Image: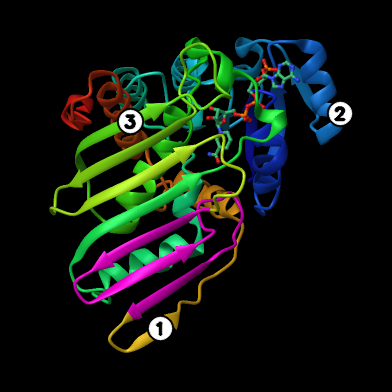
Amino acid sequence: MSVRWGLIGASTIARQFMINAIRAQADGEVAVVMSSSLERAEAYARENDIPAAVSTLDALLASDIDAVYISTTNELHLEQGLAAIKAGKHVLCEKPLALNSSDARKMVAAAKRAGIVFGTNHHLRNAGAHRAMREAIAGGRIGKPIAARVFHSVFLPENLQGWRITRPEAGGGVVLDITVHDADTLRFVLGDDPVEISAFAQSAGMAGGGLEDGAMCIWRFKSGLIAQSHEGFTTKFAGTGFEVHGSEGSLIATNVMTQKPVGSVLLRSVKGEEELSFDREDLYTRSLRQFHAAIRGKGQPAATGEDGIWSLASAEAALQSSRTGKSVAIDPQLGSLA
Ligand code: NDP
């Protein structure tokens, strides 16, 4: 039996990656799309070969679907997620799960109570490059991890220069957009959790409405490891990268903070330099495969609801730090999900 998906949001990310990722599954079907405008929903359905188009959440949830993928603007995730959970649908929700971690906890707790599968679409965990780094670290190949650096300042493409840089009420700004991914990728690759963050944010000329379009964060992890991350919307030529430096070696990854299965990972140690090999599967396709397996009772989504709470709690702490000039403790309060 196939997994029938309803798309909540006629978004760019669904069009560019997620519809293909669903269709790449032997048992994946895109059954219906919902937009706040029927005209947009119908046009989107036509362009993407989706059999049905609706303009209300009730109509979508009343359709013959098993799961929903939520990729609307961030202020809508909570209400749409709670309604889908109530309707008994499995939920794959875009990051950030909500505008604040307290709302994200509400949604994840409701999913737990309802016994449905709930995932956060942190795609980078699915990248072969990041999985190779995680394995190398867990296998002791760099000794004790001491420090990490994430280079994730990009140029926001013109077609995405909308709510992200103009609408604080929609959860715009680079921290809710990109720092959440860096929080998740650091946690995944290091196998460690952050406890404290200090951040500076800036508006370098692209974002308005008091939103930040650049941020630099300094993180402390449970193990004592410290990390730096740089997120931005305004740098055209920076390139991306991720380094983890340990007592016995360093991992230096280039061009890996991206949606595509590209980039390289170098392991440098007393033995010299070794280029790590890794699979080049599409990140979103792998994420969907794991989500479908979870629906069938095998394992969990690549990034769970708890992971989404962690990344949002981290971003929230970064924003608070940038506003107060003080370092802020990161506390996901997962105990409150019980
Ligand atoms: P878009 O701006 O493309 O879409 C968001 C919403 O904006 C849509 O639901 C749609 O509303 C509305 N919209 C889009 N295009 C138009 C238009 N031409 N005219 C009017 N309204 C329009 O957002 P993204 O796809 O960039 O992001 C959506 C979500 O996905 C966000 O939560 C974001 O953080 C996340 N994201 C995650 C990524 C990942 O790799 N995990 C990558 C990119 C985004 P309606 O549905 O009502 O028509």
CA gap between label 2 and label 3 equals 44 Å
> Which secondary structure lies at badge 2?
helix
Q: Amino acid at mark 3?
A: Phe
Of the image marks 2 and 1, the number of the one nearer the N terminus:
2
Pick whichever, 68 or 285, lies toward us.
285
Would residue 96 be seen by someone viewing this image from the given angle? no
Q: Is residue 244 magenta?
A: yes
Residue 152 at x, y percent in the picture: 47, 46
Q: Amino acid at mark 2?
A: Arg
Going 48% across and 50% down the picture, which residue do you hit?
124
Q: Which mark is residue 132?
A: none
Of the image marks 3 and 1, the number of the one nearer the N terminus:
3
Residue annotated with mark 1? 273
Identify the coloring. Answer: rainbow
Query: Do residues under tags 2 and 3 come within 8 Å of each other at their CB atoms?
Result: no
Residue 53 at x, y percent in the picture: 77, 20
Q: Nearer the viewer, mark 2 or mark 3?
A: 3
- Disc 2 CB within 8 Å of nearest ligand 1 atom: no
Pick whichever, 33 or 90, lies toward us.
33
> Which secondary structure lies at badge 3?
strand
Residue annotated with mark 2? 46
**Residue 7 vertical placement versus 26 (above, below):** above
Residue 200 at x, y percent in the picture: 33, 30
Q: Crowding near pointer 2: few (<14 within 10 Å), some, many (20+)? A: few
Residue annotated with mark 3? 200
Which region is colored magenta?
Answer: 240-268
Going 13% across and 53% down the picture, which residue do you hit?
224
Going 32% across and 24% down the picture, which residue do you hit?
319
